[in-house]
Amino acid sequence: AIPDLSPLYVRADANCSGCDLCRNGPPKLRPLQNRMLLEAERCGGAIGPMPVGSGKTVTSLLLPDAMGAKRAVILVPAQLKDQMLRVDIPRYAKHFHIHTERIKVVSYSELSIARGARLLTTLRPDLLICDECFPYNTKVITRRGEQAIGEIVHSDTPTEVLSQKDRKSVV
């Protein structure tokens, strides 16, 4: 059984009235979030294929703490960067112990332009979190054969992803 890590990450004062996160009392991490945080810490990293609405954002924001990172970079699509900085981080920091001073949010497009070429060298991240990097139906190679990321998400069996289909690099 996966333990509930909520006591480690939920702020003691996180029980505000009228907030959708506190609708049923202080927020709790979902089983998939607990599993992601534990596996990432245990394995020194993870591929976290999580569907929309499963708590991917707050999990991404808690990963630096779970993994002991001091300089985490969260890569997001350009259209989500402003939302992450102005809405998501402030909202979740009111409810969870998120070390915002350890997190830098960068868009994929920032890395693709000439002046962004040295950005990661300058930031020197010790943890790189890639948000929205694989479509749900992307095929990956596992020890059980080829599977779509969506199949892995809905499986209760731990799955080691060896590589993305048609790629030689190990993921």
Image: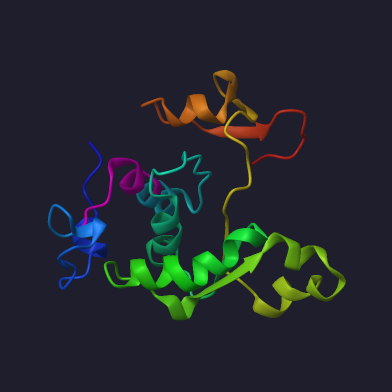
Residue closest to the eye, 149 or 20 = 20
Residue at 35% from the left image edge and 49% from the top image edge: 38
Query: Left or right: 69 with respect to 164?
Result: left
Q: State the quadrant of the C terminus.
A: top right
| Residue 93 appears in the rendering | yes
Q: Is residue 165 above or below residue 6?
A: above
Query: Left or right: 95 with respect to 103?
Result: left
Q: Position of residue 120 (x, y in %)?
A: 70, 71
Residue at 60% from the left image edge and 71% from the top image edge: 125
How many marks the image carries: the answer is 0
Give the residue furthest to the right: 114
Q: Position of residue 105 (x, y in %)?
A: 57, 70
Q: State the quadrant of the N terminus.
A: top left
Which colour style is shown? Answer: rainbow
Magenta-highlighted stretch: main secondary structure? helix
Query: Left or right: 170 with respect to 126?
Result: right
| Residue 68 appears in the rendering | no
Q: Quadrant of residue 166?
A: top right
Q: Position of residue 158 (x, y in %)?
A: 41, 31
Give the residue furthest to the top: 145
Q: Is residue 38 above or below residue 169?
A: below
The question of residue 29 being in magenta is answered with: yes
Residue at 46% from the left image edge and 42% from the top image edge: 52
Residue at 48% from the left image edge and 28% from the top image edge: 152
Q: Which residues are magenta?
A: 27-36
Q: Position of residue 76 (x, y in %)?
A: 61, 59
The question of residue 148 being in magenta is answered with: no
Q: Is residue 42 above or below residue 135?
A: below
Residue closest to the eye, 49 or 132 = 132
